[in-house]
Amino acid sequence: MKRYWLLAILSLALSLGIPLLLGGPELLPVLARLEPLWLLLLLGMILVGWNFNACRLRLLAGGTGTRIGHLRALGILVSTEFAICATPGGTGGPVTYTWLLRQNGIPASRSLALYAVDQFMDMLFFLAALLSISLYWLLIPADLPFHWELLTLGCLLVTGLTTSILLVRRYRLVLLVSGRILRFFRLSPKTRRRMARGILAFRRNLQMVRGFRPSRLLAIYLFCSGHWLLRYSVLYLAARGLGGTISWSYALLVQMFSLTAGHLTLLPGGSGGAEFSGSLLLATYLDQATAAAAVLIWRFVTFYWYLIAGAPVFSLMAGLPLWRRLNSDG
């Protein structure tokens, strides 16, 4: 527990300290340019995005025969987002998602399968976004210093999608490889058998999701796209609200790359890496103070706000037992 709180303090110190350091004494006057209504608009976009995700969860659970009310689904999603932001590397997200769905009668293996489909839809959206931006830049050439970053993100997404497909279509190979890895770490045969049964149960539930009607899958993808379009417009609108000018496509790529870099820090919310890389990339088109201010607003709306609004919801729905489990897992 003590180690976790030290990580949390370090995370918040880096998340606030890096923009303050990079922005310098001009940061506060630049932040004062943002009108309160503009900030309310950004927070409203996050609320709408959460509701889109709640609809996505209801469609996923409904396809397996489980009905979840909208407020309940919204609470599960907000609690999961809080856990992702509050734990190193976002490891608390799937644990919270699975725990809360079990309270609605969905077994753990099926909950993990739904979470995997949820993540698969996210990867499909991001791959489609990268391909669309690449095509746009080819048709309308622009002097954008974002070529190798685009390639890196594309490779990561293709790797993730390929791994997901292999798990469904070549699960015997996955079991064989995972078995050898577990043997290498000298885990007992009983533990290896239990994990193999878990993988098979996960795959069976994933196969059930494949039986969803195309209309249901399309609706899930549209809600997924709506959520990410809103969330990834935050940095663009934050810069506009401060008087800066950047393209929406560039702002989206800055966020994707910055959050990927943030995960490498293994700190809650990707603190440090997200702020540092985001400020540097934005400084190509904005002055240093405006870039740091835009990053600070972006992180408030998509990180601090997730913690502030999510903490009471998580406490109400999950409570102390799950919080202790997240701490012990971290």
Image: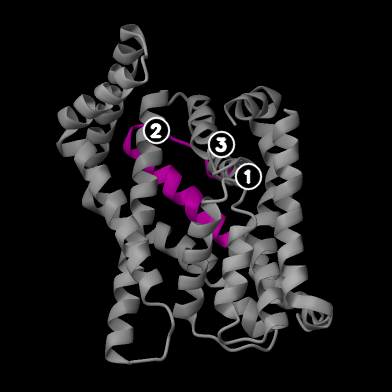
**What is the crowding at mark 3: few (fewer than 14 residues within 10 Å), some, or many (at least 20)?**
many
Residue type, numbered disc 3: Gly
Precedes in sequence: disc 3 or disc 1: 1
Residue found 52% across the figure and 28% down from its top: 99
**Dot in front, 3 or 1:** 3
**How far across and down, in percent of the image, does residue 326 sit?**
61, 29
Secondary structure of the magenta portion, mostly?
helix
Residue found 51% across the figure and 59% down from its top: 261
Instruction: Left or right? Give the position of 284 relative to 61.
Output: right
Residue found 48% across the figure and 58% down from its top: 260
Q: Secondary structure at mark 1?
A: helix
- Would you place residue 51 above or below residue 253 in this image? above
**How far across and down, in percent of the image, does residue 205 sit?**
28, 30
Distance between the alpha carbons at the discs numbered 2 and 1: 18 Å
**What is the crowding at mark 1: few (fewer than 14 residues within 10 Å), some, or many (at least 20)?**
many
Residue found 22% across the figure and 31% down from its top: 174
Instruction: Left or right? Give the position of 158 relative to 325.
Output: left
Distance between the alpha carbons at the discs numbered 3 and 1: 9 Å
Q: Secondary structure at mark 2?
A: helix
Residue tagged 3 = 92
Residue tagged 1 = 82
Magenta range is 47-71
| The disc label shown at residue 112, or none | 2
Using the rendered image of the protein, determine whether residue 122 is visible from the camera's viewpoint.
yes
Which quarter of the rendered picture does the N terminus lie within? top right
Using the rendered image of the protein, determine whether residue 220 is visible from the camera's viewpoint.
no
**What is the crowding at mark 2: few (fewer than 14 residues within 10 Å), some, or many (at least 20)?**
many
**Dot in front, 2 or 3:** 3
Q: Is residue 52 magenta?
A: yes
Instruction: Left or right? Give the position of 258 relative to 175.
Output: right
